[in-house]
Each structure stands twice: as C-alpha cells, then as structure tokens.
Image (cartoon, rainbow, N blue to C red):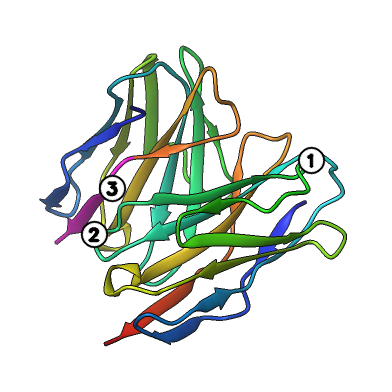
Amino acid sequence: GAVVSQHPSWVICKSGTSVKIECRSLDFQATTMFWYRQFPKQSLMLMATSNEGSKATYEQGVEKDKFLINHASLTLSTLTVTSAHPEDSSFYICSARDRGRWYEQYFGPGTRLTVT
Amino acid sequence: AQTVTQSQPEMSVQEAETVTLSCTYDTSESDYYLFWYKQPPSRQMILVIRQEAYKQQNATENRFSVNFQKAAKSFSLKISDSQLGDAAMYFCAYKGNGNKLVFGAGTILRVKS
C-alpha cells in the first residue's frame, strides 16, 4: 500500500516551452502533496505544499508563476514548469500524505527534467 | 525553526560489517517524529525506519536500528551486517507539528566488497 506514482519519469524539453509533471496517489487519498527539487548529491529542497482544492503554499524563493501547482483531486497533483530554461533542469520529486497518517510522507519515484 | 544536521558527507563500510550514521537535530517541540530515508541510485526515497519522540525504546527494523537520545537531540542509524544493496544516500528527517519534513544534508554510504 501507500504507492505514489509520477509521470513522466524523464522528460526533455526545449528552452521556452512548458512541461507538466503528474503525481498520483494510487491506493490512498492524499489530502496534502509536496513537491521537491533535488540536485545531484544534495538534499531535497521543498518547493511547495498543496492541499486538495486550495492554492499551493510556496517556499521562499520559489517562483509561483514559473512552477504552477494544481491539486485538483485527492489523488492527483500536477507541477507545470512554465517557460522552462536550462537552469530548471533538475530532479523533481513529489510526496503525498495519507489522511490517516499525518506524520508520514510517501514519495514518488521522481522525474528528471532536462531543458535544452 | 527546526534544523537537522548530518555531519558525515560520506561513509564507507566493509561488507558484513557495521556502520553508524550520525544525525542531530534542533527543536523546541516535545512531540515529533524522526525518520531515516534511503535513496539508492534509482533515486526513489525509501523509508528505512521511524521513531516517535514519545517512545523511549529505540526503533528496530531487521538490520537497521537507531540510537535515539532525546535529551541530546541525537538520532543515529546503525546498519548491521552491511550488504552491497545498502549503498545509497541516507537522509535523516524531522517531522514536528508543522506540515513539512525537515531533511538533513545526507550521507553517502559506500559498501566495499
């Protein structure tokens, strides 16, 4: 149980285009989802927290207009990187919290974004 | 704000031997959870072990155990009988009353055959 999927696992896009990453909780209802960014050999950096049906809360320094987060249902959150640039290339990880287990986050497998 | 410190950027262990990864944290909260996550080369985050602060007994999961010292705010991970598959980056994390997980910088564990 408690499986989180991400799609796509790997995406290459051209500079100036937008790309959408999906995060789904497959066997539980995720009232809260989190989006992280991770550079090689570094820790996870929280970008934003989203609650189903409400606007995401972004961490300081994260551009809201560049990283659009939508959490429209209890099983799906999306991260859209708008007008992507090479510096947006990174590994993006989502996690989800089960309604009944507030202390634990379940992580997706991550998405590697390369902007050329 | 809470902080988590992992002071060992890299560690090495011989296969079948024991290694301990260090973690300290800072908080003013009395109720919280501590976690160790493993991130292998696939980069999938895997929960290794969880400790509730109110429990005095140290958590154990097969070859993985923790030494939780609440007063010292220390939470080390011991891996016994190390295996090649244990090679990964290990993150210590804190969860208090807030929404967020606070992660340490991570420790890269190398296992030598």
* Magenta span of residues: A108-116
Q: Which residue is mark 1?
A: B54
Left of A83 or right of it: where is B105? right
Give the quarter of the figure containing the C terminus of chain A: bottom left
- Give the number of the mark in front: 1 or 2: 1
Residue A47 position, x and y percent, is 48, 45
Badge 2: few (under 14), some or many (20 or more) residues near its Cα, within 10 Å? Answer: few
Left of A102 or right of it: where is B82? left
Q: Which residue is mark 2?
A: B42
Q: Are marks 2 and 3 in contact (CB under 8 Å)?
A: no
- Give the number of the mark in front: 2 or 3: 2
Left of B31 or right of it: where is A4? left
How far is the residue under mark 2 from the one under mark 3?
9 Å
Which amino acid does the dot numbered 1 rest on? Tyr
Figure quadrant of residue B16? bottom left
From the viewer's side, name the closer residue of A72 and A2: A2
Residue A48 position, x and y percent, is 50, 38
Which amino acid does the dot numbered 3 rest on? Gly
Residue B69 falls inside the magenta stretch:
no
Q: Are labels 1 and 2 assigned to the same chain?
A: yes
> What numbered label is drawn on residue A110?
3
From the viewer's side, name the closer residue of B87 and A88: B87
